[in-house]
Amino acid sequence: MLKQRFSDKIEVGCDEAGRGCLAGPVVAAAVLLPDYFNNKILNDSKQLSKKKREKLEKIIKDEAISFGIGVVSPKEIDKINILNASFLAMHRAINQISNKYELLLIDGNRFNKYKKVEHKCIIKGDAKYMSIAAASVIAKTARDKIMKDLSEEFPQYSWESNQGYPTKKHVSLIKKFGVNKIYRKTFKPVKDLI
């Protein structure tokens, strides 16, 4: 059962999607939920079906006080590395929160401080707190849409079904069709195939 709050401060939950992918951007979301927000289906996005995520995305966007989505491109990921790119995506998402808040709840164990705002890193936070779980759903659905759109431009890689993750089939498609601009050139096995 997810907890509604971590503290008595005004909290924004943050999470990202696509860190372990070979292709596409890393996408983060920041969500400021009202105190009364409660949803029995809401969970870490990885535990939810695509259908449930899409249903929750609408509910969260409708009921959130504010939310933001941050995107960092494959080119930027190669330049600054995936960890820094994840932090940058979160910062870009937080930039879009228009209401007052006092504490950032970050999924994971590390974060680069955002301005002068207090933050708390929570391992597996997306399975513990509503605001982080909500951010995980928004980040995942946003990223899946980006990969679906990219797969229309590059259908040979099946990104609409593998989302850029290193599945066996995806790696074999990269070997067959080569690497394009959507791939992260510093990631193995992409690096080895260039």
Image (cartoon, rainbow, N blue to C red):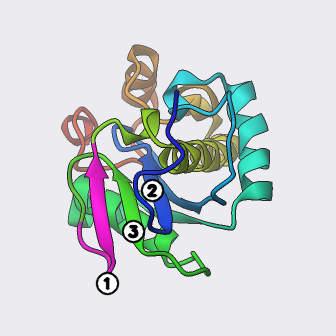
| In magenta stretch: residue 121 | yes
Determine the secondary structure under disc 1: loop
State yes or no: discs 2 and 1 in contact (Cβ < 8 Å): no
- Report which quarter residue 187 is drawn in: top left
Determine the secondary structure under disc 2: strand
| Classed neighbour count for the residue bearing mark 3: other residues with Cα under 10 Å, few (<14), some (14–19), many (≥20) | some
Which residue does the numbered mark 1 point to in the structure image? 115
Between marks 1 and 3, how big is the CA–CA gap?
Answer: 12 Å
Q: Which of marks 1 and 3 is nearer the N terminus?
A: 3
Residue displayed at 50% across by 33% down: 44
Which residue does the numbered mark 2 point to in the structure image? 14
Residue displayed at 76% across by 56% down: 63
| Side of 5 where 105 appears, left or right | left
Residue displayed at 54% across by 44% down: 130
Q: Which amino acid does label 2 sit on?
A: Cys
Determine the secondary structure under disc 3: strand
Which residue does the numbered mark 3 point to in the structure image? 103
| Classed neighbour count for the residue bearing mark 2: other residues with Cα under 10 Å, few (<14), some (14–19), many (≥20) | many
Q: Give the range drawn in magenta.
A: 112-122
Report whether residue 194 is seen: yes
Q: Nearer the viewer, mark 3 or mark 2?
A: 3
Q: Where is residue 129 in the image (x, y as percent from the top left)?
A: 47, 42
Q: Where is residue 113 in the image (x, y as percent from the top left)?
A: 25, 73
Q: Which amino acid does label 3 sit on?
A: Leu
Residue displayed at 52% across by 42% down: 133
Q: Please tell me which residue lies in front, 162 or 172.
A: 162
| Side of 53 where 139 appears, left or right | left
Between marks 3 and 2, how big is the CA–CA gap?
Answer: 11 Å
Q: Please tell me which residue lies in front, 147 or 141.
A: 141
